[in-house]
Image (spheres, helix red, strand yellow):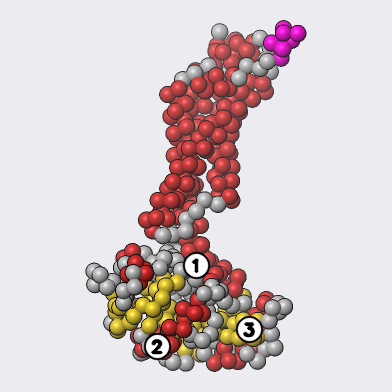
Amino acid sequence: MNLNVWNTRKIPLSWLLLTRQPLRLFVAIAGICFAGILMFMQLGFRDGLFDTSVTVHKLFDADIVLISPRSKSSISMSGFPRRRLIQSMAHEDVIGTTPVNWTFVLWRNPKTLSTRSILALGFEPTDPLLTDKEFSSKAKSLTNPGRVLFDELSRDEFGPISKWFRQGRVVETEVAGKRVRVTGLVSLGPSFGADGNLITSRETFLKLLPNTPSGSIEIGLVRLRRDADSEKVAKSLQLSLPNDVKVLTTEEFIQFEKNYWRNSTSIGFIFTLGAAMGFVVGCVIVYQILYSDVSDHLAEYATLMAMGYQIRTLLGVVGREGILLSFMGYIPAYLSGQALYLLVRNSTKLPVVMTYQRASLVFSLILIMCMGSALVAMKRLVDADPAEIF
């Protein structure tokens, strides 16, 4: 019985071949890890770009959004007549609207006195704007002229606004060259287009930017009855309203912004190319390791072939080496990716997080990278001729 158990045991040949030379194994793992980290970072920045570009978009309390057809993105919004919102109220499914002004202004850091561009949103404080239930109580303070709500997730370059406000200090500064007071904090978050945000009333907004026509807005928020079909209502409004306004559902508004960064800028392409380069670098490293391993043990493989082992059995050895390398390289790459994402979040306040989809994608790419390299390295084994070797 013991003899049968011994005969049924399998020798972990793939593992033994990999660990025979620890230095070579370390180099292989380091190369795969580097490729994985590069893919994690490039894909993380790319997806973070798309996600942060719609940070504010996702928070709007609206089912349908009206914008100008001339608007290209959140960093290039054009105005349209405010009366289009009033006209949309004629639809039976529309229950409310909110006109919103949207543009960039200069914010003066009250501590360093340096200026920096910040995204300003102006709306009627009595109208709904964000889905945050606590926002309406904060917005009441905006009824007084010269009052603003500051985004506490804005970058540190705007000054210690959140810290001072929580300490009970009166926080005043200049926006567009005019004095304003911070009367509350909101949590919106920066994006690749805007490092910070502030919200104020339309009255204050028009005082900050006196050249803005009072009847013009950049965004119109439309709320529908709970059982209304937003897509059907959007199509209906698009047909009934003049062509100086574009009607989008909330999801289409989000995709409108993402498509700009994805298709109209080179940023998305650059990050995708960076991830592809990491994949190629990993393929080269793994191929060199496996090819060298097969070449160094070619005599042993040829001996096994001469003893009657089938070529597919030996090819399986090389394939298993590729699988082992993919797991050993992915684990440190994943852990390093998590650490680097944390560093990026703390340094830039961008929501670059590890998602299940991205973790699965990178693992699949590493597995394909290792198995593809193993397949190419197998050609050396297939071409081996026992007679020529001996």
Q: Nearer the viewer, mark 1 or mark 2?
A: 2
The residue at 36%/85% (across/down) is: 146
The residues bearing labels 2 and 3 have C-alpha atoms spaced at a distance of 36 Å
Q: Is residue 17 above or below residue 280?
A: above
- Per the rendered image, the range of residues in magenta is 1-8
Residue to which mark 1 is pinned: 55
Do the residues bearing badges 1 and 2 touch, measured as CB atoms within 8 Å? no
The residue at 49%/79% (across/down) is: 137
Q: Nearer the viewer, mark 1 or mark 3?
A: 1
Image coordinates of residue 212 in percent, x first then y, are 40, 88
The residues bearing labels 1 and 3 have C-alpha atoms spaced at a distance of 26 Å
Q: Is residue 115 above or below residue 347?
A: below
The residue at 27%/73% (across/down) is: 110
Amino acid type shown at disc 1: Thr
Do the residues bearing badges 1 and 3 touch, measured as CB atoms within 8 Å? no
Say which mark, if any, is on residue 144.
2
Amino acid type shown at disc 3: Gln
**Most prominent secondary structure in the magenta stretch?**
helix
Say which mark, if any, is on residue 238.
3
Residue 361 shows in this picture: no
Amino acid type shown at disc 2: Asn
The residues bearing labels 1 and 2 have C-alpha atoms spaced at a distance of 27 Å
Image coordinates of residue 209 in percent, x first then y, are 36, 86
Does 80 appear in magenta? no
The quarter of the picture where the N terminus appears is top right
